[in-house]
Amino acid sequence: MHVIRIARHGGPEVLSVREIPRPTPGVGEVLIRTVAGSLNPVDRKTRAWEVGPQLPATLGWDLAGVVTASNHSRYRPGDQVIAMSAQIATSRGTWAEQVSLPRPARVGAAPRPVPHPGPDHRGLRLPGRAVRLRPDPIVSPRPVLDEDPGLPETWWKEIVAALAALADVLPPADREAVREEYLRHVIPEYTGHQIDAVTWTTAHGDLHDGNITRGPHILDREGWGRAPYGYNAATLYVYALLTPDTAARIRTELAPVLDRPEARTGLLTVCAQVLQAQDRIDFHAELASPVREHLAHL
């Protein structure tokens, strides 16, 4: 069968179509013939950055398809399903003609599509499902802030509370937002700093103002998993450096997290990721200069 894979990280040119053996479903798994897939921000990040599963890797997180073989009592060949593979954790990409997935990967029989009524919501139809889109706008149209977004005090209080709570969640054993071997490689290479022991926590994986609404609601959680302590707060802070007043406000509000010694590794990781990707990602190129200035005083 055919899959879309990467053997190295880089731009779109590293994507290639390859032929590999069809997977065989294990105990409690189903084999799905892919009818439709998706392109998520996490797929671009996995392709461009040194994050994600071991290479070579098949990309893709989501699919809609038809069960062709089943070792699970709930599913039969012919069932129409939607699924998320959690590719970073499982190494099972969905950009493939067929994918074998276990029940923990959230394979579910698709209900009939029912659009959500009312003038404030739209029905986004996926195969077999309608998804409600929240009407409140995102804080920034792109990951970096170009101007002060003028957020109310309630927004700051809720985000600070959410990040403080998330920072204290024990890291998952089976999901990695940032691999230890990656950060131990890129931090000294791109920042000139050294790190010792790493304190791990649970992270969103890509927490910037392009993924937070004015509600606030946090979006795009596909890349969540284990990351260095302070990684969430550091991402929000570093991606605001082009707007110094807002960055200073973030630094002040998130001081209970960022002032802890163990948060240094999370901050260095984000800075290293920016500098590593500056030649291929435009907004990282914009951030490179303020990141270097910040590192000089770290």
Image: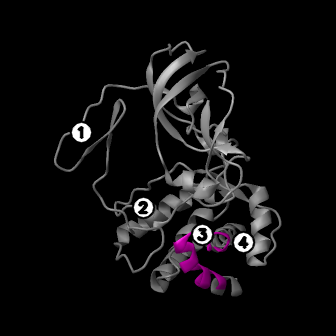
Q: Report the mark closest to the observer, 2 or 3.
A: 3
Among numbered discs 1 and 2, the one appearing first in the sequence: 1
Q: Nearer the viewer, residue 218 or 284?
A: 284
The residue drawn where x is 35% and y is 25% is: 111
| Quadrant of residue 14 within the rendered picture | bottom right
The three-letter amino acid code for the residue at tag 1 is His
**CA gap, disc 2 to disc 3?**
24 Å
> What residue sits right under mark 3 in the picture?
280
Could you classify mark 1 by the number of other residues whose Cα lies within 10 Å: few (under 14), some (14-19), or many (20 or more)? Answer: some
Q: Which residues are magenta?
A: 275-292
> What residue sits right under mark 4 in the picture?
261
| Quadrant of residue 182 within the rendered picture | bottom right
Q: Quadrant of the C terminus?
A: bottom right
> What residue sits right under mark 2 in the picture?
212
Among numbered discs 3 and 1, the one appearing first in the sequence: 1
**CA gap, disc 3 to disc 1?**
40 Å
Q: Nearer the viewer, residue 98 or 270?
A: 98
- Which element carries disc 3, helix, strand or loop? loop
**CA gap, disc 1 to disc 2?**
23 Å
Q: Report the mark closest to the observer, 4 or 1.
A: 1
279 inside magenta stretch: yes
Among numbered discs 2 and 4, the one appearing first in the sequence: 2
The three-letter amino acid code for the residue at tag 2 is Ile
